[in-house]
Image: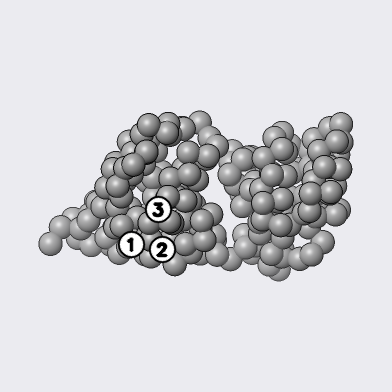
Amino acid sequence: MAPKTKRRCIADALEDLEPEHLEKFRHQLLDRKGESRVRRAMVKDKNYMDLADVLVSTFTEDGAVKVTEELLKEIGCLGAAKDLVEDVSAQSAKPGSGSTDADVKDMSAQSASAHSGSCDGDGDEHFVDKHQLELINRVGNVAPILDYLLIKKVIQQEMYDEIRKLPTTQKMMREIFSRCLKAGKACKDIFYESLEKNERFLIDDLKNKK
């Protein structure tokens, strides 16, 4: 039997969602920031197969898998996100899939990284701690990062308002590090997730640095 396409894997993951979770998925997809945006008319009243088509046509197959996993986590469907990655990896490992062992290992590594809290190998130092100085100096879009920290309850409204009043992004970032991330690894993980969403090229650049 031929392996399923990534489009089919995405459709299967969405088919398993409860109706209210599928609706939340649609809203998150519409609210998603980035270069590729989905218009409301493209997803309104669409079923899981149509949504899979929209995702693949907008983000390509590989990108659609990553976006779907990301949005499933955001709406709290962590099991569905994990199952999707495992399904794609399993299909890629089948003969005739056209994927190499390296592709499968890369997919698994990405999933593990998302669950591990993004710690670097050096003594399990957290990514945001290791690159604190560069993040303070190079992050350019702090507003959506603060929004995400507020939504995830890392910060309260009062602290959010205080930080937003600061005159420069560098001062905002220093406040995030000094006041918002003291509660521990869970807060740093959420901060890192927001950085990946809003400063993807910067994060990729820092990851490649030795």
Label 2's element? helix
Q: Residues within 10 Å of mark 1 (few under 14, many from 20)?
A: few
Q: Residues within 10 Å of mark 3 (few under 14, many from 20)?
A: some
Amino acid marked by disc 2: Ala
**Residue 210 visible to the viewer:** no
Circle 1 sits on which residue?
16
Circle 3 sits on which residue?
22
Image coordinates of residue 9 in percent, x first then y, are: 29, 55
In this picture, residue 164 sits left or right of residue 116 = right
Q: Residues within 10 Å of mark 2 (few under 14, many from 20)?
A: some
Q: Quadrant of residue 15?
A: bottom left
Q: Tell which tag, 2 or 1, sits nearer the viewer.
A: 1
Residue at point 62%, 63% (across, down): 117
Mark sitting earlier along the chain (3/2): 3
Image coordinates of residue 65 in percent, x first then y, are: 39, 50
Circle 2 sits on which residue?
80
Amino acid marked by disc 3: Leu
Amino acid marked by disc 1: Asp
Image coordinates of residue 68 in percent, x first then y, are: 42, 50
Label 1's element? loop
Q: Quadrant of residue 53?
A: top left
In this picture, residue 7 sits left or right of residue 206 = left
Is 167 drawn above or below residue 133 in the view shown? above
100 or 114, nearer to the observer: 114
Mark sitting earlier along the chain (2/1): 1
Image coordinates of residue 130 in percent, x first then y, are: 74, 55
Residue at point 73%, 57% (across, down): 154
Query: Label 2 vs label 1: CA separation?
Result: 8 Å
